[in-house]
Image: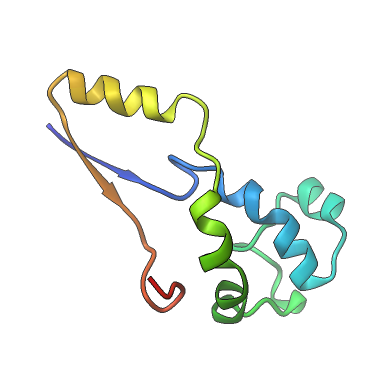
Amino acid sequence: MNIAIDIDDTITNTFEYLQPYTAEYCSHPLEELKEKAISYDNTPPEWGLVMNEFAKKYFDLLIPDTPVKDGAADVIRALRRLGHRIIIITHRNNTLYSD
């Protein structure tokens, strides 16, 4: 069986990892973002986060170090041992990343 697995917030903890940077960019307290479950991809429009600008400021620098979720690698390895073909997918593109 072919199994496609997304990177952000499936394999990695991107949402939580980028919360402090979202708070900085939007000038809101990190505690507020955590309380309201807000990060880079769901900020209220009135906060003025412009994804392309946010991405250019942070993504190339931070995304390579995004923490992998506990157990993600073990699950992927187990699926491969069972004979499944794993396909890593993403919505990432060269609009938001330089590489």
What residue sits 40% from the left and 48% below the top?
7
Residue 53 in the image: x percent, y percent? Answer: 60, 81
Q: On the rendered image, what quadrant is the C terminus found in?
A: bottom left
Query: What colour scheme governs how the chains and residues are painted in the rendered image of this protein?
Result: rainbow
Asked if residue 18 lies left or right of residue 60, the reply is right
Asked if residue 88 lies left or right of residue 17, the reply is left
Residue 91 in the image: x percent, y percent? Answer: 37, 62
Residue 92 in the image: x percent, y percent? Answer: 39, 64
Whether 64 is drawn above or below 26: the answer is above
Asked if residue 64 lies left or right of residue 29, the reply is left
For residue 46, what is the image quadrant? Answer: bottom right
Q: On the rendered image, what quadrant is the N terminus found in?
A: top left
What residue sits 79% from the left and 66% below the top?
24
For residue 3, what is the image quadrant? Answer: top left
For residue 39, what is the image quadrant? Answer: bottom right
Q: Nearer the viewer, residue 79 or 64?
A: 64
What residue sits 50% from the left and 45% below the top?
9
Whether 41 is drawn above or below 73: the answer is below
Q: How many marks?
A: 0
Residue 71 in the image: x percent, y percent? Answer: 46, 24
Whether 27 is drawn above or below 11: the answer is below
What residue sits 17% from the left and 18% below the top?
82
Q: Which of 31 and 62 is in front in this view?
A: 62
Asked if residue 94 lies left or right of residue 57, the reply is left
